[in-house]
Image (cartoon, rainbow, N blue to C red):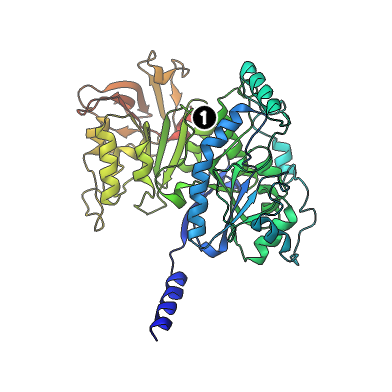
């Protein structure tokens, strides 16, 4: 009887295991035009989830690519360990390396899986584009030179070393990098589209994560890659922080290597499939390459009026990607939970707020307060003046407001606005300020209503002054302010991003 109870308990525990919580990000659909994105939360059961590891080879003809794979591999291995522990499946797909694994149990198992009844036509072929729309859009980066970003001298020395090792300098890979462990009892090894499909069907896999290299080449095009799986109806996602592109910054659009990868990720989100980040599975923060020196800008969004989830994503992708890494934490309509805020703030260099009347959980508010009191920059737009005010109402249990946030952080004094029916305009009053670079000196229409914010706190520097038709008094609409906690200046803009578009 005891043995029966123990076995039953283990089975019950497995059945009741908490599903993986993931947040899918994509940029599809006319309602998310202008490169905006939408987020979708899903719960994935471990036994219905797989990871495919794409071409994480032991070597490469590009030395920089080898170094990045070595840096990436330990994090991928951690992800695989976690997925296995949840009952998930791992398929290792180091293309053109099957001879090395000829007698490996994980390779032999893959070859024995029965042929699926729903095997898609063309599943063993490279897929160059998922559809005509993607073909017409084309790649956002120029990798026509193969994407190598080595210094010529370094590359010459690496090529010579490969020859000394008896490797083909053009394709020196032999196996998967050894840092990524292969469980002979649980995992599979295959670079065949048909075999991978058979495995996924045999094991009842509904959700697939794809990791590895290179984003703009093998990850997209291989027979087991994103396009084939998405085209044939699989719920496949790219783990966007566990990948790397082949891109030479000397080519269009002449951004950093890592910004080039981000552009390819955005292309995938728009045309192929959604993406997630590894910290959704592992906790902590997303993986970042050590040489990606771009400061991180975190967009914290929680409002329903200005569609800043879409417009700020467009602004970031169009204007900031050269110089910044960026991420988005979004609270859905009516929600106070900014999921992932605490770890996201830990490596954030500047915070961008577009929030209206939310009361985050106490732990999230404490993390936000720590960030602000550290003196790091905060940029706020429009309703962020009353981001955490409920007009004196009590927040839900366990949640907090910050009624004095406007004055404390922005040096503002929001009271009300003049209404949406009045045309509004702004003009620079500090044209030499770097924030206003390229804006010009003349007056421009801003859209929206003019906020009543006077008087500002002592020390606030007005950058833009606004007016509303039929209203005599002018109001500041953008200013900088240094808080009592010191550090960098804090900026506030009294209109949403659509104002930038109209201006």
Residue 308, given in percent of the width and then of the height, sits at 45, 40
How many marks the image carries: the answer is 1
Q: Quadrant of residue 136?
A: top right
> Does the rendering let one see residue 390?
yes
Of 391 and 159, nearer the camera is 159
Query: Is 379 located above or below residue 107 in the figure?
Result: above
Of 394 and 287, nearer the camera is 287
Residue 226, given in percent of the width and then of the height, sits at 66, 48
Query: Is 261 located above or below residue 156 in the figure?
Result: below
Name the residue: 58% across, 39% down: 265
Left or right of 291 in this view: 235: right
Left or right of 115 in this view: 21: left
Residue sitting farthest toward the right = 121
Q: Quadrant of residue 195?
A: bottom right
Left or right of 414 in this view: 203: right
Residue sitting farthest toward the bottom = 1
Query: Is 119 located above or below residue 501 in the figure?
Result: below
Name the residue: 65% across, 44% down: 271
Q: Secondary structure at mark 1?
A: loop
> Does the rendering let one see residue 413?
no
Q: Which residue is mark 1?
A: 321
Residue 116, given in percent of the width and then of the height, sits at 74, 65
Residue sitting farthest toward the top = 432
Name the residue: 60% across, 46% down: 30
Q: Quadrant of residue 296?
A: top left
Residue 307, given in percent of the width and then of the height, sits at 47, 43
Placement of the N terminus among the 4 image quadrants: bottom left
């Amino acid at each position: 009887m005891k043995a029966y109870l123990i076995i039953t308990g283990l089975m019950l525990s497995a059945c009741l295991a908490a599903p993986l919580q993931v947040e899918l990000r994509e940029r599809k659909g006319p309602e998310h035009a202008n490169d905006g994105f939408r987020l979708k939360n899903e719960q994935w059961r471990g036994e219905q989830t797989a990871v495919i590891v794409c071409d994480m080879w032991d070597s490469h003809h590009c030395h920089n690519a080898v170094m990045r794979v070595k840096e990436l591999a330990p994090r991928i291995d951690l992800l695989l360990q976690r997925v296995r522990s949840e009952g998930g499946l791992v398929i290792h797909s180091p293309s053109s390396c099957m001879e090395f694994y000829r007698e490996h149990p994980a390779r032999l198992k893959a070859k024995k899986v029965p042929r699926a009844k729903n095997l898609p036509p063309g599943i063993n072929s490279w897929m160059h584009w998922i559809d005509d729309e993607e073909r017409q859009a084309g790649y956002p980066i120029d990798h026509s030179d193969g994407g190598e970003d080595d210094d010529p001298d370094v590359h010459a020395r690496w090529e010579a070393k490969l020859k000394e090792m008896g490797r083909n300098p053009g394709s020196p890979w032999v196996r998967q990098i050894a840092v990524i462990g292969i469980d002979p009892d649980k995992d599979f090894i295959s670079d065949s589209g048909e075999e991978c499909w058979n495995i996924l069907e045999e094991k009842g896999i509904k959700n697939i994560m794809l990791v590895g290299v290179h984003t703009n080449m093998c990850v997209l095009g291989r027979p087991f890659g994103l396009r084939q799986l998405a085209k044939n109806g699989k719920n496949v996602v790219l783990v966007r922080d566990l990948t790397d592109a082949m891109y030479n910054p000397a080519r269009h659009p002449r951004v950093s290597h890592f910004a080039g990868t981000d552009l390819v990720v955005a292309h995938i989100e728009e045309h192929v499939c959604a993406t997630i980040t590894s910290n959704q599975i592992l906790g902590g923060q997303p993986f970042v390459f050590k040489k990606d020196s771009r400061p991180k800008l975190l967009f914290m969004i929680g409002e329903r009026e200005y569609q800043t989830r879409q417009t700020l994503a467009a602004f970031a992708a169009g204007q900031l990607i050269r110089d910044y890494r960026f991420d988005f934490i979004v609270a859905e309509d009516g929600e106070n939970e900014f999921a992932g805020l605490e770890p996201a703030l830990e490596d954030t260099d500047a915070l961008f707020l577009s929030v209206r009347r939310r009361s985050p959980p106490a732990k999230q508010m404490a993390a936000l307060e720590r960030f602000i009191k550290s003196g790091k920059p905060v940029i706020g737009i429009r309703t962020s003046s009353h981001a955490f005010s409920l007009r004196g109402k009590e927040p839900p249990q366990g949640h907090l407001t910050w009624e004095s946030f406007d004055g404390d952080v922005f040096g503002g004094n929001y009271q009300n606005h003049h209404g949406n029916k009045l045309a509004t305009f702004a003009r620079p009053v500090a044209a030499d300020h770097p924030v206003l670079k390229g804006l010009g000196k003349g007056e421009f229409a801003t859209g929206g209503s003019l906020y009543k914010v006077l008087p500002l706190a002592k020390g606030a520097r007005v950058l833009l002054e606004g007016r509303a038709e039929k209203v005599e008094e002018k109001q500041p609409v953008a200013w900088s302010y240094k808080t009592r906690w010191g550090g960098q200046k804090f900026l506030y803009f009294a209109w949403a991003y659509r104002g930038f578009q109209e201006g």
